[in-house]
Amino acid sequence: MTKRTTSENNLYTKYYQPYQGAGTVRSGNTTMDHTLTVALQKFNAREYESALELFQQVIANDTNNPVGHFYSGVSYQETGRFSKAIEEYEIVVKDRDNLFMEQAEWYIGLCYLQTQDRKKAYRQMERIAKSNNYYSQKAEAIIRKLKPE
């Protein structure tokens, strides 16, 4: 393992915190509400593969569902499929009108660390640092460590 890879893995380990899932969600569709509720229960029980199947059902029924996309991203991240996680988080970020924006942006940056895409990780952390949100200071700390020596 190269020094850089070890450094990126260490940064990921230091700053990654598993997302604490929610309980229930309400919409106008009781079938999807039930599917989403069961998916969140599976997620909270750390049954990520089962949860992922259910989140994907929710997304198939409602392609713009930020809850389904965000938790799919976290489930992919928890199971080591970082590129798939980034895809899901980018859908959440593109929507811009949801409660998961900041968290999705942060997790994208962390996923880039895990895929050893140092340039994208650096750029993502720069955006977060400039946004003055909850993760700004942590992003600044990562930027300092990612700077070329």
Image (cartoon, rainbow, N blue to C red):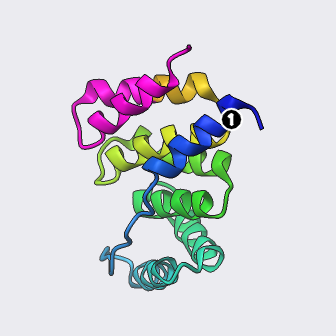
Asked if the stretch drawn in magenta spans residue 136, the answer is yes
Give the labeled residue for mark 1.
5
Q: Is residue 116 visible?
A: no
Q: Secondary structure at mark 1?
A: helix
Relative to 104, 48 lies left or right: right
Identity of the residue drawn at 46% across and 57% down: 70
Rendered image quadrant of residue 114: top right
Image quarter hosting the N terminus:
top right
Relative to 35, 117 lies left or right: right
Q: Nearer the viewer, residue 128 or 87?
A: 128
Asked if the stretch drawn in magenta spans residue 112, the answer is no
> Residue 6: x and y, percent?
66, 39
Neighbours of disc 1 within 10 Å: few (<14), some (14-19), many (20+): some
Identity of the residue drawn at 46% across and 29% down: 124
| Residue 56 versus residue 120 in the image, above or below | below
Magenta-drawn segment:
125-149
Identity of the residue drawn at 45% across and 84% down: 41
Amino acid tagged 1 = Thr
> Residue 12: x and y, percent?
53, 46
Which residue reaches farthest top?
A: 149
Q: Nearer the viewer, residue 11 or 27?
A: 11
